[in-house]
Image: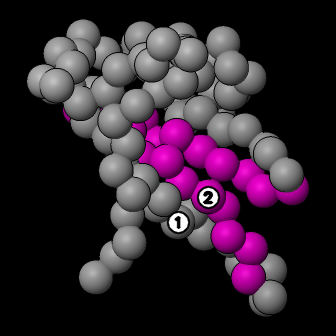
């Protein structure tokens, strides 16, 4: 089975995410709250990062990367899900 050729672009990805309940923030990234956690797609010119918002005991907040995908590696599956994200486990 060969690699699927992708024609994904930033605008196509954003349209897909908006159709699934994600909302643009003031920086042009996409956010959604699910299960009490806030998630974000950080939109870059050639890639997308999937992040979760961490809340620390002292009240501080920080975005932590969960996975990354280049548009060239992304495609929609037959059931309408986005494929191509690679998990990030750190060093």
**Foreground residue among 39 and 79:** 79
Say what secondary structure mark 2 lies in: strand
**Foreground residue among 82 and 39:** 82
Compare marks 2 and 1 and give the one earlier in the sequence: 2
Q: Which residue is mark 1?
A: 64
| Residue 28 picture location, percent across and down | 53, 29
* Circle 2 Cα neighbour tier, 10 Å, few/some/many (<14 / 14–19 / ≥20): some
Which region of the structure is painted magenta?
Answer: 36-56
The residue drawn where x is 13% and y is 24% is 2
- Quarter holding the N terminus? top left
* Circle 1 Cα neighbour tier, 10 Å, few/some/many (<14 / 14–19 / ≥20): some
The residue drawn where x is 37% and y is 63% is 88
| Residue 75 picture location, percent across and down | 35, 20
Depicted 35 relative to depicted 74: above or below: below
Classified by dominant secondary structure, the portion drawn in magenta counts as strand
Distance from label 2 to label 1 (Cα)?
5 Å
Residue 12 quadrant: top left
Q: Which residue is mark 2?
A: 52
The residue drawn where x is 72% and y is 38% is 32
Residue 11 quadrant: top left
Residue contact between numbered discs 2 and 1, judged by CB atoms under 8 Å: yes
Depicted 49 relative to depicted 82: above or below: below
Magenta span contains residue 57: no
């Amino acid at each position: 089975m060969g690699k699927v050729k992708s024609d994904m672009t930033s605008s196509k990805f954003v349209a897909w995410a908006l159709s699934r309940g994600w909302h643009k923030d003031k920086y042009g990234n996409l956010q959604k709250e699910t299960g009490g956690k806030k998630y974000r797609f950080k939109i870059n010119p050639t890639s997308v990062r999937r992040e979760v918002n961490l809340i620390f005991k002292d009240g501080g907040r920080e975005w932590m990367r969960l996975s990354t995908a280049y548009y060239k590696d992304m495609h929609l599956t037959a059931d309408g899900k986005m494929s191509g994200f690679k998990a990030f486990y750190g060093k």
